[in-house]
Image (cartoon, coloured by chain):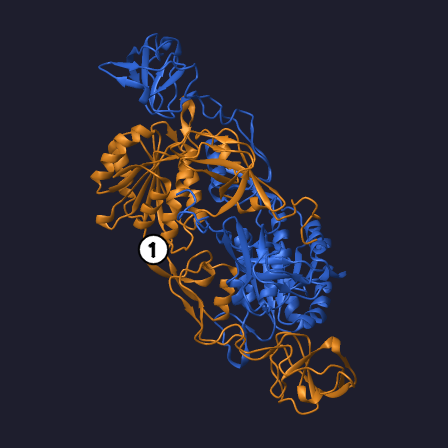
Chain colours: A blue, B orange
């Protein structure tokens, strides 16, 4: 077991130990947010036929040579129905009324926009000379049979759901969702509806960590509160051995070490590290029950902010790797520091910050009290500013990176000075 | 009814018409992503008592004057249990073993870190002279009774779930989720498992739009495909009148106008606009059944990309407003254009782009074919580049704004040239 690692070293150990879960077949409508476990190939051509890109008239381009100088009148043969049914191929000297997306009739090779034509009684007068294929979307423009439309690892968003539906796919093969066993520990802890008389506190970590799992698409299983006795902790940890990942947060840090380690080892856990040079979150532990094909296990600090920040740095990448997701870490944003920040060297600090956009620049301001017990300051934070381990000062105006916790904190650009309410107003 | 509006004008009309839905009471565990309908006040003090910020020894600071010059030995009176129970107040000349987060015993006023002390047989030798309150977290440091902890409109993320749990809140009052009735129209359309012989195509819009609703936290209700007959469309629209919002996408644009408008008006819809100067998505319509206290209604173009892009510009802000969410629009990101883009003036273009990060700069590259039928290009896109209505050229290197569709496209900073694998390695 290694102790006092750098954040990035510890993250690499976690990523090395986490493996993608086996795939499962899932109805497309339930696969939103999942990563494909295999590429998706098409058996179809999309669009299935040449179709019109405009509302107007399907024509034969050869009939309209010179029409831009002297309008040409064509017989209006029929209207292409939305279902795409045409009574017969289009003949010489004929035009067919057509709408966007409808298939171009056999015999026609071009579409004239309705604003370049004037309908008469059974005829249409046209004053442009289209090139062949003008305003025609080619069959297969989007997808050809055999195309690899989506790669393995691609995350299914709304457009992917539509693409899969277009291909007639009702079921996709995706990585399974990790089941995450969550427990906390401490004689002082009660559940949310428990009695807090005598200085007891709610085991809020289990609620926060379950919500963090859910946001990532993992499936939390809350096992409860272990009392400060080895047998009780062992009982709960054993109940988590059938999960994919155990996340434990306990009440006290040194107590944890003395108390949790023998229990984990008795159950067959191999500890990979204990302690990472970061603040908040130093006393974070990571191990695995790999000999038994069992879960990864994370021991998170008991302080609410420490537990939540350590989850984002270590548990998140493990769960994303299990889900086959290509982006393990929180997205980051370049910012400038609004107020000078100082610390001692040696530990990387994750500073809770709010973001403010000025033009194309984000400014990060500390949410204030950075005590690891102040969970409300994490609720007010838009992100975590990375204050590197060996740095001692980030001066006001200096550049830094922020791990983004809330994408809406980016703003919609309407904050830009001198802009109208929206930049594209 | 207004026609050919600018995008921002049309968005303002939508926001004016959309009202927050009535609140509902919800179990905290199910409220993730919801906006609070009323502020949350605390009836508790957090932490409930002064507690230790370190593992070490609770002491009386007065006993340790001069200990930094000449170590002082204190009697080890007891250990503060994790549950916080102390047998008696700490007396003069005594110390108590304490761990992070545990309440400081009565009589003690300071905590000495364990690395500044050395335990002996029933005693502890201390070589620092702490100030009163050193390494003590004050009772109420996080929350005092009566504090307004979260404002109305605050969106509930994981940290908020933990804060609410800490306060003993099991139920919160949040804005309801909009129920969104989704229908499509066209004789050429089939469901995902339908027969596509003869040029029929899957009604993919209903799947894409349902997924877009779900991502926002709204509740899609898929009503089906209306055939190209007024009575069939009327039947489906009527089935949607009990929803909060109807989103209809149909197969052809001019056809829609002629066909849909009389049906909507017959059902009591007041149309606010039809046609917005944008591409893709020009033929978008918006109305409301306000006289009947009924839903908003959006008529989206039939082309898959047009429908999805128009949803993000107009339906999204309406749904977010209904949910009491403070950020109606897609978050935007300043970028530089990787390749020169050109267009005619008059319509705002939403260009599907991929993002690439170089240092602190994102570069946006078109996904290629921008035909509004090519849904795979939207699946490949990280965002929509805003090419303003009157602009005709964005030169390579020029600045622009991108509406972000996938937050993971920001990257985690490891793409920065010259950086280690992670910027905080």
Q: How many marks?
A: 1
Q: Nearer the viewer, residue A173 or A385?
A: A385
Mark 1: few/some/many CA within 10 Å (<14, 14-19, 20+): some
The answer to whether residue A154 is left or right of residue B371 is right
Residue at mark 1: chain: B
Q: Nearer the viewer, residue A21 or B133?
A: B133
Query: With respect to residue A241, does B83 lie above or below?
Result: below
Can residue A26 be seen here? The reply is yes
Can residue B224 be seen here? The reply is no
Residue depicted at 63% across the width and 70% down the height: A232
Query: With respect to residue A411, does B258 lie above or below?
Result: above
Instruction: Report helix, strand or loop for mark 1.
Output: loop
Q: x, y percentage for residue A156? A: 52, 41
Q: x, y percentage for residue A247? A: 62, 60
* Residue at image mark 1: B20
The answer to whether residue A363 is left or right of residue B390 is right
Please identify the quadrant where the C terminus of chain A is shown. Answer: top left
Please identify the quadrant where the N terminus of chain A is shown. Answer: bottom right
């Amino acid at each position: 077991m290694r102790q006092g690692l750098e954040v990035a070293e510890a993250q690499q150990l976690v990523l090395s130990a986490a493996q993608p879960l086996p795939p499962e077949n899932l109805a497309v409508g339930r696969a939103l947010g999942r990563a494909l476990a295999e590429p998706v190939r098409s058996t179809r051509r999309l669009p299935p036929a040449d179709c019109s890109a405009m509302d107007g008239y399907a024509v034969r381009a050869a009939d309209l040579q010179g029409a831009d100088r002297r309008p040409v009148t064509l017989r209006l043969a029929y209207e292409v129905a939305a279902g795409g049914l045409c009574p017969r191929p289009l003949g010489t000297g004929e035009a067919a009324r057509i709408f966007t997306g409808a298939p171009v009739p056999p015999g026609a090779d071009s579409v004239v926009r309705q604003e370049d034509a004037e309908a008469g009684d059974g005829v249409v007068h046209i004053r442009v000379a289209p090139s062949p294929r003008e305003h025609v979307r080619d069959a297969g423009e989007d997808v050809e049979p055999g195309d690899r439309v989506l790669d393995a690892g691609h995350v299914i968003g709304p457009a992917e759901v539509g693409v899969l539906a277009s291909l007639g796919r009702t079921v996709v093969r995706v990585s399974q969702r990790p089941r995450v066993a969550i427990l906390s520990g401490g004689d002082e802890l009660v559940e949310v509806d428990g009695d807090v008389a005598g200085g007891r506190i709610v085991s809020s970590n289990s609620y926060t960590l379950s919500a963090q799992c859910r946001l990532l698409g993992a499936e939390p299983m809350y096992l409860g509160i272990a009392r400060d006795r080895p047998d009780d902790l062992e009982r709960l940890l054993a109940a988590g051995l059938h999960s994919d990942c155990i996340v434990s947060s306990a009440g006290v840090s040194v107590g944890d070490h003395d108390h949790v380690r023998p229990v984990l080892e008795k159950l067959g856990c191999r500890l990979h590290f204990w302690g990472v040079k970061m603040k908040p979150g130093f006393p974070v532990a990571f191990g695995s029950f790999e000999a038994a094909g069992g879960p990864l296990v994370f021991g998170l600090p008991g302080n609410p902010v420490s537990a939540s920040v350590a989850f984002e740095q270590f548990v998140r990448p493990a769960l994303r790797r299990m889900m086959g997701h290509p982006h393990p870490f929180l997205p980051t944003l370049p910012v400038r520091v609004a107020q000078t920040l100082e610390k001692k060297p040696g530990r990387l600090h994750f500073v809770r910050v709010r973001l403010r956009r000025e033009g194309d620049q984000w400014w990060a301001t500390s949410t204030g009290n950075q005590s690891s017990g102040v969970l409300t300051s994490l609720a007010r934070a838009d992100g975590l500013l990375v204050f590197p381990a060996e740095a001692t000062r980030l001066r006001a105006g200096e550049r830094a990176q922020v791990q983004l916790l809330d994408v809406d904190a980016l703003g919609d650009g309407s904050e830009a000075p001198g802009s109208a309410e929206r930049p594209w107003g």
